[in-house]
Image (tube, rainbow, N blue to C red):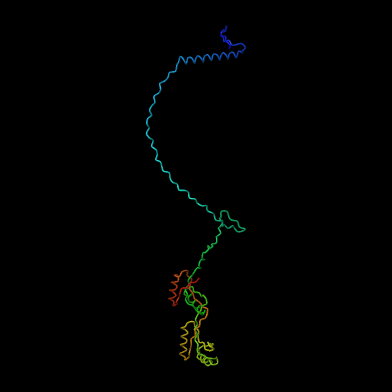
Amino acid sequence: MRRIDLSGDSGELSAPSGLTPRAKRLLVLLVIVAILGAGAFAAQKYLFPEAKLPPTPARPLAQLPPIAQPPVKAPELVPPARIVPPVKSPPSTLVPPPAGKEAKLGEPLKPKPEPTRPGPGARPAPPEQRYSIQVVSCVEEKNARSLVRSLQAEGLSARIVRGRATLTRHRVYVGHFSSPEEAREMGDRLHAEGIPATLEPMEKGKYGYLISSSFVLNDAIDRAHELLKKDYVPSIRSAQIQASVYRVLVGRFAHRTETNEPIRRLKEMGYSPIPVKES
């Protein structure tokens, strides 16, 4: 251990030989700092002891009022979300513009109407039914046309509908001869009295003069009575035949109740109209 010599003529601290002046000064400064620190520590420990402070008594805490808790609200039951199946969009039915023509901007294309088809097992819709009023049914066309003109003059929409029907024809005959030669005398007499007659064959090879033919039995009976008054022996023979019929119809109505007023008017004119159904 080296010894530091504190004596000297100049009163300065001596440092070991062999050190630079600067190192000597630093060493002296460290020694002084160490001495001062040791003195301060000794003074604090022995001259100024730390006084212990009395413990601070515990202060009771004031009891705080209970904090009012907000009422607990029951949770709302939320219904489960409804699952909606995805909707399939129908195929587009837009009709493109015709060739050579361009669609205008902002103008929507018109959808093409889809044809309605009946489902399997569905019955076809019945045809629309209409009603007309039948005034008369004539065998001769000229009579039907004359009646149509009279009804149109009264402001009624009359028309003729021709059809076929099974009718009973009543013929009035005079005589019952075995041959045309035998019937010649009767023919001369009829022509002399101005009674039109035609010799026609009858059943079983017999011949007779046809006087009149009518589809109305009463007309045939009246004609037979006239021949009886002239001392002739008439006979009426009836037979069913297929003949043309000319029906005189008035109007076209969607419902039968619409025919009530025209029927009342026709009855006042002396006819016997009846409503008939037409398809």
Report the number of discs: 0
Name the image quarter holding the N terminus.
Answer: top right
Q: Residue furthest top?
A: 9
The front one of 106 and 22 is 22
Relative to 92, does residue 261 appear above or below in the rendering?
below
User: Where, by quadrant of the figure, is residue 12 drawn?
Assistant: top right
Relative to 256, does residue 138 appear above or below in the rendering?
below
Coordinates of residue 155 in the picture (x, y in percent): 47, 73
The front one of 12 and 222 is 12
The front one of 266 and 11 is 11
Coordinates of residue 151 in the picture (x, y in percent): 48, 75
Coordinates of residue 92 in the picture (x, y in percent): 56, 56
Relative to 50, does residue 222 appear above or below in the rendering?
below
